[in-house]
Amino acid sequence: MSENENEHDEHHHTMFGFDAYNMNFAILMIFTLIEVVAVALTFSMKGTVSMSTVVWILVIVGIVKGYGIAAVFMHLKGDPDSRVLTATALFPVFFIIIMVLFIGLTSPGATDSLPSWCRPGFYN
Amino acid sequence: MSYGDTDYHDDHHGWHTPHNSWAPILMAFGASFFLLGFTKVFTQTWEGDAWSYAIHSGEIWGLIAGLAIFFAGVVVFWRQDWGHDGSYEPKSVGTPFRSIDVRKVAVWMFLMSEMMVFSSLFSTYIRYRTGIPNCETLYNSAGGLAEGTACWLPASYFIAEGGWHQETAHAALGFMPDTLIPGAINTFALIVSSYTIVLALKTAKNKSLSDAERNRKVGVYLLCTLMLATLFLMFKMIEWFIGFEVGSGDDALFYSPSLFADGFTIHASDYEYTVCHAWEGHHCVDKDVTTIDVRMAASTFYVTTGTHGLHVFGGMVALVYMVIKAFSGGYTPANAVSIEYFGLYWHFVDLVWVLVFPAFYLY
């Protein structure tokens, strides 16, 4: 039984012909460098690099890094159980969207109209 | 305990112990108790014109009891895990997780709840960030700020921009402020630690290595992960409370005051917002100082990054155990998945940092 258990672990994953872990690590390091340099540029070249450009760079870098970590390091790509576990990992996204829509983007005065039992100081 | 023996998991009936444990329930109960105790010990009260904060040391029993129950659960779990050699790993039987290790499914379920924790913190951040006017924008559009204005001064103002004293905060590197250094190093430290943990997993699965060599290598990789996590929290403490200065005074090569020293605290209802109009060397000779309220930005920053830091600390506690187990020969190709399951948590913590770092430190 224990022979079969680790069967899928024997597969050797590669990425562009290199070991997947090494390659992913290199990509993560490069993109982190891009991230820090992008922000450093807004500091050193104040006024010449627009904030929205930097935000876009941060978003793209975040997506690439997030995908790299989840797909390669967390084995959400290429393993027999990857599909069902990806679906599991994405399941809370539904609730997250609801939360962001209904809490994240509520009107600015929303917290002021909360009932007293929901505000600090009520239980003291 | 030696892992060379063949009968260390024998319970006198010839059965191997499956990796089923009730200890996580105990841990969850302890954690709930601890968090409840937290609300009893630390309180804040609105006094009509200001908040007062109090620490009720008489209520500390809840915190201690919660921690005690939590660590009792941890000890039970470690005792059960110590002898697990990979035999009889329980498998899920129902749809959709059929034939996947129960432990793996459990870790993913746990990560789902963790996603909700961090999502609630992020939605809070989005809510306040979009709802509260930015201090710098207000200052620039109105040419000044009214005393006591409640506005959003992001942590990035201190970290990515070097605060109002930025003229003294980029002495050596030039292209980036010194205050960004701890956060930048930490980002790399977490990425490297994610790599060392997968190397530990890969090595533990490697059947071609001798037992002694494998044990040593897995132990070293796990130890590296632990050291990087320690580095992460150390730099976090420097960034929050300690600050750093290389050289001294006006000739300092690096100068990075802590957020605490800069007045960016959860109590900062009277933060002195400073805009310097003229510098003489590292000294401001003409400045505007306005007292403003930046508690919302500070609380959101400390709670979110603190929750993340707490997760790093939790990982460190587990890593200490795993390092000891690895050097004792506890990880073999048959039970290497234990490292993978811890790794899932560790990568998740890294993944959260991938979001926290740009949202709180850079933007």
Image (cartoon, coloured by chain):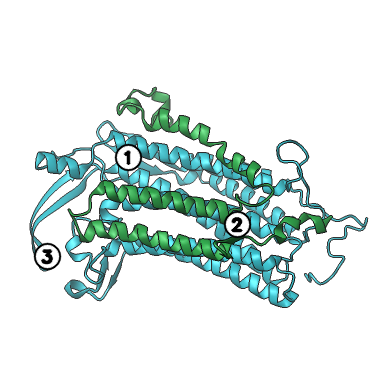
Mark 3: give few (<14), some (14-19) or many (20+) Cα within 10 Å.
Answer: few
Q: CA distance from mark 3 to mark 2?
A: 48 Å
Task: Please tell me which of labels 1 and 2 falls first in the chain.
Answer: 1
Q: Could you say where residue B42 lies in the image, as x and y percent from the top left?
A: 43, 43
Answer left or right for B2 relative to A49.
right
Q: CA distance from mark 3 to mark 1?
A: 35 Å
User: Toward which corner of the image does residue B26 lie, by quadrant?
Assistant: top right
Looking at the rendered image, the disc whose residue lies closer to the viewer, 1 or 2, is 2
Of the numbered discs in the image, which one, if any, rests on residue B52? 1
Q: Chain A: give its colour.
A: green
Task: Please tell me which of labels 3 and 1 falls first in the chain.
Answer: 1
Q: Chain B: give its colour.
A: cyan
Q: Is residue B43 visible?
A: yes
Q: CA distance from mark 1 to mark 2?
A: 42 Å
Q: Could you say where residue A45 lies in the image, as x and y percent from the top left?
A: 20, 59
Residue A86 position (above or below residue B277): above
Residue B124 position (above or below residue B243): above
User: Toward which corner of the image does residue B149 lie, by quadrant?
Assistant: top left
Task: Please tell me which of labels 3 and 2 falls first in the chain.
Answer: 3
Of the numbered discs in the image, which one, if any, rests on residue A11? none
The N terminus of chain A sits in image quarter: bottom right
Label 1 SS: strand
Q: Chain of mark 3?
A: B
**Residue under the point 66% across and 62% down:** A12
The C terminus of chain A sits in image quarter: top left
Answer left or right for B138 relative to B58.
left
Q: Could you say where residue B33 lies in the image, as x and y percent from the top left?
A: 58, 41
Q: Which residue is mark 2?
A: B343
Q: Which residue is mark 3?
A: B283
Front in this rendered view, residue B125 or B249: B125
User: Toward which corner of the image does residue A42 lie, by quadrant?
Assistant: bottom left
Kindly indicate whether the residues beneath marks 1 and 2 are on one polypeptide chain: yes
